[in-house]
Amino acid sequence: MSEPVIRELRFPATQADGDVSAIVLRPADCRALLVLGHGAGAGMRHRFMEGIARSLASHGIGTFRYQFPYAEAGRGRPDRTHTLTATVRAAVAAATEVEPDLPLLAGGKSMGGRMTSITQAESSLPGVRGLVFFGFPLHRPGDDSDARADHLAEIDVPLLFLQGTRDRLAELERMKVVLSRAPERNSLNVVEDGDHGFDVLKRTGRSAEEVYDGMAAAVADWQGTLTT
């Protein structure tokens, strides 16, 4: 099998923040491109982002990973929501320009996924056929509010949630209740023993690569069910 093609580029995030970096990973048999935002605590080169991109490529899903402005500038605190959502929208536009022949998905890890869904709820992202969440951050640890999911009701494309059973930011039974409100739109893939970063207990004997491969296979299977 041919190695995936890797391209690094920059695109304008917002008028105020200027350009940010992105990495496109396109496998030879690519059938869709996932615009993938990173989590709050790490940028697009975090080991999870690197690992899931490689695993997705092995299942025919390309990725367009990108930086939010605060990560690009080396700041620790995430940007305001309007800056994050503007960057999501700009990333989707840039991905469309770079790979115009590929069907688009969008989403991300934790905050990156949530910002993508907020953006989609505000105004549909052009060409995006579904959203993918790697650990949707439903609530803060110990918080009993599900308000972070309220905007999901405004989204009109299919949604795939990949959630660990030990995720302290999305207690699984509460997540299932939220997703049951629109079962025709929402799909859930459960990662047994996974925490919010999808690290699993050592006693399971599963490597990070095996966990990532399972999630990537779930994304590829789900993508295959989407209508064109």
Image (cartoon, rainbow, N blue to C red):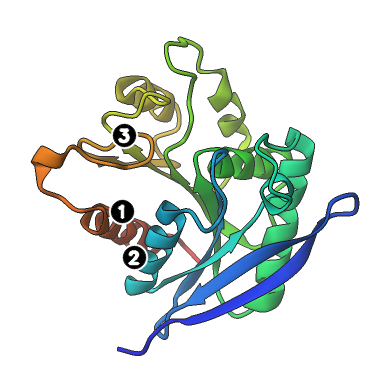
Side (left or right) of 219 relative to 190: right
Structural distance between the alpha carbons of marks 2 and 1: 8 Å
Marks 2/1 in contact by CB < 8 Å: the verdict is yes
* Whole-percent x, y for residue 148 in the image: 57, 24
Looking at the image, tell me whether mark 3 or mark 1 is earlier in sequence order: 3
Mark 1 closeness class: few <14, some 14–19, many ≥20 residues within 10 Å: many
* 175 left or right of 214 in image: right
* Identity, as a three-letter code, of the amino acid under mark 2: Ser
Query: In x, y percent, where is residue 119?
Result: 69, 43
Quadrant of res 76: top right
Image quadrant of residue 141?
A: top left
Residue in the image at 18% along x and 37% along y: 201
Question: Where does label 1 land, which residue?
Answer: 215
Residue annotated with mark 3:
195
CA distance separating discs 3 and 2: 19 Å
Q: Check disc 3: other Cα within 10 Å, few if <14, some if 14-19, many if 20+.
A: some
Residue in the image at 64% along x and 65% along y = 22
Separation of residues labelled 3 and 1 (CA atoms): 14 Å
Is any part of residue 5 visible from this angle?
yes
Q: Classify 40 as above or below 62.
A: above
Task: Indicate which label's residue lies in the foreground, 2 or 1.
Answer: 2
Outermost residue toward the right in this view? 15
Residue 99 location (% of width, % of height): 62, 77
Nearer mark to the viewer, of 3 and 1: 3
First in sequence, mark 3 or 2: give its number: 2
Residue at (41, 52) in percent of width and height: 48
Which residue, given by chain and number where applicable, does mark 2 sit on? 55
Looking at the image, is mark 2 or mark 1 earlier in the sequence? 2
Q: Is residue 84 left or right of residue 176?
A: right
SS at circle 1: helix
